[in-house]
Image (cartoon, grey):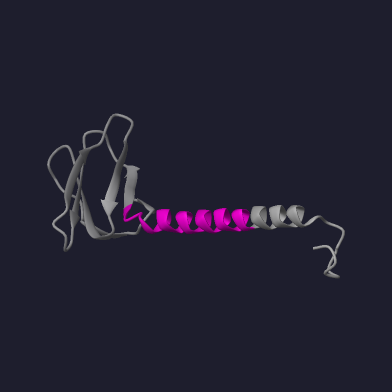
Amino acid sequence: MRGSGLDCGFPHQQVHDMTRKFQTFIAAAAFLVGASGLAQAQSTSGNIQGQASAGEKIVVDGVASGYHREVTVEKDGKFSIRRIPTGNYVVTRTRADGTAGAPKPIQIHAGVTVRVD
């Protein structure tokens, strides 16, 4: 930019290169922010975990969805049911002798683990 009166001491090419790098940095940052929001929006399930006596059966039934899942509690007394679609559910614990406990209503939210004991 010689002779233009706007000479700031930097050669024109250096200014252009710095501007290009800055634009690339801003574009990459915008992409990363957008991608992280998309990943969070894609989570549409939650989990249930808890403790019960070994041999008990934990039954999860969706109130409106028809979802049904059963797990048998292992020796350590812990259970975990993963990737349950968001919504309202009823959890019932059936003892080893066949008697069922009171049904417990729960709500599953995306990315959240509900504790049921």
Percent coordinates x, y for residue 36 in the rendering: 47, 54
Q: x, y percentage for residue 99?
A: 14, 45
For residue 61, above or below residue 78: below
Q: Which residues are the magenta region?
A: 23-45
Q: Tell me the chief SS of the magenta region.
A: helix
Q: Residue furthest top?
A: 75
State left or right for residue 5 relative to residue 72: right
**Residue sitting nearer the eye, 6 or 76:** 6
- Inspect the magenta stretch and tell me whether residue 34 lies in it: yes
Q: Residue at x 19, y 57 (%)?
A: 62
Question: On the image, which quarter does residue 38 sit in?
Answer: bottom left
- Could you tell me if residue 98 is visible in this image? yes
Question: Would residue 116 be visible to someone looking at this image?
Answer: no
Whether 97 is among the magenta residues is no
- Name the one closer to the observer, 17 or 40: 17
Q: Going by the image, does 115 lie left or right of 56?
A: right
Residue at point 29%, 29% (across, down): 75
Q: Residue furthest bottom?
A: 5
The one nearer the camera, 78 or 4, is: 4
- Which residue is depicted at the point 21% across and 40% down? 71
Q: Residue at x 21, y 55 (%)?
A: 102
Percent position of residue 87, x then y? 26, 61
Task: Report the number of discs.
Answer: 0
Q: Position of residue 77 (x, y in %)?
A: 32, 35
> In terms of image quadrants, where is residue 89?
bottom left
